Amino acid sequence: VLARVMPVALLWVGGQMLAPPHCQCRQGSKFPSLTPDQFLHLSNFVDQVKDGGYIVSGLTFSNDGNVTGNHGGDDIWIVKINSAGAITWQKTLGGTGDEDAGAIWEAFDGGFIIAGNSTSNDGDVSGNHGLDDIWVAKLSSAGSLIWQHSYGGTGFDDIIDDPASAGMQQTFDSGIILAGWTTSNDGDVTRNK
């Protein structure tokens, strides 16, 4: 069910995460293993997954505490949280450039699909065409990177960060539809006028 993913702004008050009313996160849920500073980075998208926990995407420039594996600059930070609020696993994705997280979905096969943007062409990211590309990655249910792909050209290519569509939809045949904007007219982009 694709409608479960919502962009959210999370607020940490007195050791409790408070989410806006439209978020499907439980109001007042406690996430004791995340510090307030870490949760400020984790405010892009939340999806409640089949096991009752949550998958959260955001960005981080940290490489300490619960955040490990930063590649440099801003990286995408994915955190799987169980129904009690404890971190099951976390993963930073990116390269030495900057990445920004967009939507994350639980795929039909139980893995996760993340869409965002990247300026990197190293680390977890390959195939960048230049400047900012749309970047899509598939993770296993345990957080291992299965595949990734950069889409765009030599200009700026950006995924739509819209609450209604989140710039990405999974199709019933397990495909992905992406929506974005571009200044490119080369690489994967043709007929841009």
Image (cartoon, rainbow, N blue to C red):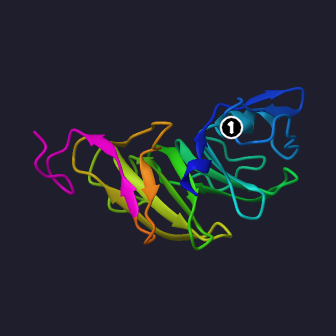
Near-viewer residue (87 or 4):
4
Q: Residue at x 60, y 69 (%)?
A: 111
Q: Residue 180, position in %: x, y?
A: 33, 43
Q: Is disc 1 surrounded by few (<14), some (14 to 19) or many (20+) residues within 10 Å?
A: some
Q: Measured along the vertical axis of the image, is residue 37 above or below residue 109?
A: above
Q: Measured along the vertical axis of the image, is residue 135 above or below residue 59?
A: below
Badge 1 is on which residue?
23
Asked whether 68 falls inside the magenta stretch, the response is: no
Near-viewer residue (14 or 120):
14
Q: Residue 49, position in %: x, y?
A: 69, 59
Q: Is residue 12 left or right of residue 132?
A: right
Q: Residue 118, position in %: x, y?
A: 41, 48
Q: Residue 82, position in %: x, y?
A: 81, 57
Q: Measured along the vertical axis of the image, is residue 10 above or below residue 173?
A: above
The amino acid at mark 1 is: Cys
Q: Is residue 59 visible?
A: no
Element type where label 1 sits in the image: loop
In the image, the segment drawn in magenta is 176-193
